[in-house]
Image (tube, grey):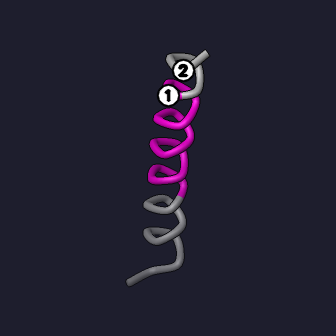
Amino acid sequence: TTPTGEGVTSARTFVRLRRCVLVDAFRIV
């Protein structure tokens, strides 16, 4: 468990969640 690895994983997860939320928002609108 390295800070760098965790940071990268968190960033990727955050981007994925953000994309899903944005896509859902656009679909709803």
Residue at coordinates 49% horizontally, 59% vertically from top-left?
Answer: 8
Residue that mark 1 sits on: 24
- Label number found at residue 28: 2
- Camera-side residue: 12 or 16? 16
Q: Amino acid at mark 2?
A: Ile
* Quarter of the image where the C terminus is located: top right
Q: Is residue 11 left or right of residue 1?
A: right
| Residue placed most toward the observer, 27 or 9 | 27
Magenta stretch: helix, strand or loop mostly: helix
* Residue lying at 56% horizontally and 41% vertically, measured from the top left: 18
Q: Nearer the viewer, mark 2 or mark 1?
A: 2
Residue at the spot 45% in from the left edge and 53% down from the top edge: 13
For residue 21, above or below residue 2:
above
Q: Quadrant of residue 26?
A: top right
Find out whether residue 19 is within the magenta segment.
Answer: yes
* Residues at marks 2 and 1 touching, judged by CB atoms closer than 8 Å: yes
Residue 10, labelled with which disc?
A: none
- Give the residue type that dot 1 points to: Asp
x, y percent for residue 28:
54, 20
Whole-percent x, y for residue 27 in the image: 50, 17
- At 54% from the left edge and 52% from the top edge, which residue is drawn? 14
Cα distance between the residues tagged 2 and 1? 6 Å
Report the span colored magenta. 11-24
Q: Secondary structure at mark 1?
A: helix
Q: Give the quadrant of the N terminus.
A: bottom left
